[in-house]
Amino acid sequence: MANFPTHIAIGTVVSGLAATLTLAADVIAPESLVAVTLAGVVGSVLPDIDLKDSRPSRALFAGLAVFFSFCVLFVTAPKYSIAEMWIAWLGTLVGVRYLGQKVFSKFSYHRGIWHSIVAGLFFWFLTAVIFRHLLGFHEGVAWLGGGFVFIGYMTHLILDEIYSVDVHETRIKASFGTALKFYDSKRLGESALVAGLAVVTFMITPPAKVFVDGVTSQQLWAGLHSRLLPQHGHWFGIDIQQQRSALGLGKAPVATDITTGSISQRPASATVTPAVVPVPEVSKKTD
């Protein structure tokens, strides 16, 4: 499988490319785009949450602990005292970081159900719920953030499958096919549980109409197509053709009468006037 730095690097690149398209489409505010892009990066390492006592697992649970603890803090702020907020925040931080990781590791194994498309859908729906109901983002932004997580998740699974093919020794490793799958055939009970969680989470997601209408809009895709390349060849505000002309490159060919080959270069519309050769007048001899 690909290592942790590789997943982070490729996940960041993919999220950045998707964020560029989103920014060009001008569908969400830049400050919301930052959160959405970070969600995509998290999604790119999220499948390795089932690694026991490893650096990726500890990093993921540490990040999730910070995230959920501050979510709890923001939710409880209007209702509780400072001391109560401290207890709720610290309890969530420690509980998710240590207790959550221990329980999760006990009931999971690497390349199990969490390396599957169903798990990716579950985290898409869960992210949409968190963005909308805990962080207060707009419905469309919530679904977009979940979509970024799903894209990062799929990037991780595809990378694992690519690294399962040994190009140098021209062989396929035993791990091939264990990452990009719909369910875990070894533990059908866990697969059914995650599928059920995905269905339940989907039922409490915010309305997706704004998101669906946005991504299926012909106007949006037409606008992205028009912005795909610089207009009139002006890259970064520089007229490339003008710069080439100034450097003496790419000049237009100079017209010349010299022709080559057996095909005449005369225009088809030109008429050829035959040359009239004067015939010398012959004097008649008289007898």
Image (cartoon, rainbow, N blue to C red):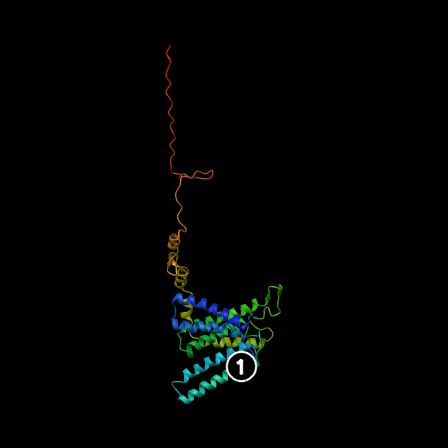
Instruction: Name the quadrant containing residue 167.
Output: bottom right
Which residue extends farthest top? 287
Residue pointed to by mark 1? 101
Residue type of the residue flagged with mark 1: Gln
Q: Position of residue 78 (x, y in %)?
A: 38, 85
Q: Position of residue 248 (x, y in %)?
A: 40, 51
Q: Position of residue 141 (x, y in %)?
A: 41, 72
Q: Position of residue 49 (x, y in %)?
A: 53, 76
Instruction: Name the quadrant containing residue 209.
Output: bottom left
Which residue extends farthest front? 247
Quadrant for the N terminus in the image: bottom right
From the viewer's side, name the closer residue of 128 and 65: 65
Instruction: Name the quadrant containing residue 206.
Output: bottom left
Quadrant for the C terminus in the image: top left
Whether residue 121 sits left or right of residue 30 in the image: it is right
Q: Residue at x 40, y 67 (%)?
A: 23
Q: Residue at x 45, y 86 (%)?
A: 88
Q: Look at the image and tell me whether residue 223 can be seen.
A: yes
Picture mark count: 1
Q: Residues within 10 Å of mark 1 (few under 14, many from 20)?
A: many
From the viewer's side, name the closer residue of 111 and 186: 111
**Secondary structure beneath disc 1?**
helix
Whether residue 189 sits left or right of residue 205 in the image: it is right
Q: Look at the image and tell me whether residue 193 can be seen.
A: no
Give the answer, above or below, for where 8 lies relative to 241: below
Whether residue 42 sits left or right of residue 176 in the image: it is left
